[in-house]
């Protein structure tokens, strides 16, 4: 179960499924994160939303994320092209933005808590 901290309301810039990682867009909306280089902001934990709808996102604490691949407990989590959590494992000299750290070992399709700690790591 998630232990939500700060929750902020934004307008969705495109469809955002529940349990997805989001990024802030240039127009002060949030959109689904689509790359390891996106400035990852928060998690839309509760509801699927469509373009233009109001969406509450969790900025800190823990949030339930849908995973798109295997991640071991304690490993850093980034986003795949579908806003799902995947292991952040950048190549040497490359950077990955992260949303936080997995609190459970997961496989693709699992929804599990992530300790939110947005940042960047380098391989």
Image (tube, rainbow, N blue to C red):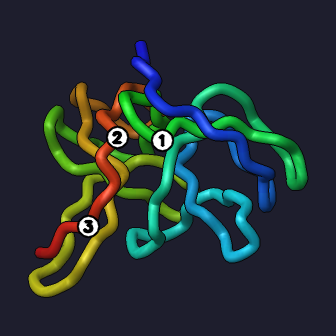
* CA separation in Å, label 2 and label 1: 7 Å
Q: Position of residue 79 (x, y in %)?
A: 43, 57
Location of residue 83 in the rendering, given as x and y in whole percent from the top left corner? 54, 54
- Left/right placement of residue 111 relative to residue 24 reads left
Mark 1 crowdedness (10 Å alpha carbons): few <14, some 14-19, many ≥20: many
Q: Residue at 55% x, 66% y: name it.
A: 34
The residue labelled by disc 2 is: 116
- Which residue occupies the extreme right position in the image? 52
Q: How far apart are marks 3 and 1 (CA)?
A: 16 Å
Of the 4 image quadrants, the one containing the N terminus is: top left
Disc 3 versus disc 1: nearer the observer: 1
Q: Earlier in the sequence, mark 2 or mark 1?
A: 1
For the C terminus, the image quarter is bottom left
**Circle 1 SS class:** loop
Residue 96 is drawn in which quadrant? bottom left
Q: Are marks 3 and 2 in contact (CB under 8 Å)?
A: no
Q: Under tag 3, what secondary structure?
A: strand
**Mark number, residue 59:** 1
Does residue 9 appear left or right of residue 112 in this picture? right
Q: Dots 2 and 1: beta carbons under 8 Å?
A: yes
Label 3 close to label 1 by CB (< 8 Å) = no
Q: Which of 115 and 15 is in front in this view?
A: 115
Looking at the image, residue 93 lies above or below residue 80: below
């Amino acid at each position: 179960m998630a232990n939500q901290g700060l929750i902020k309301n934004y307008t969705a810039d495109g469809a955002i499924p529940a349990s997805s990682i989001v990024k802030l867009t240039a127009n002060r909306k949030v959109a689904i994160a689509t790359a390891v280089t996106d400035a990852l902001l928060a998690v839309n934990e509760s509801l699927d939303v469509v373009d233009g709808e109001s969406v509450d996102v969790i900025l800190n604490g823990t949030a339930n994320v849908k995973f798109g691949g295997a991640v071991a407990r304690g490993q850093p989590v980034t986003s795949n092209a579908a806003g799902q959590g995947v292991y952040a494992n950048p190549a040497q000299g490359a950077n990955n933005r992260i949303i936080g750290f997995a609190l459970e070992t997961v496989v693709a399709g699992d929804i599990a808590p992530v300790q939110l700690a947005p940042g960047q790591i380098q391989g």
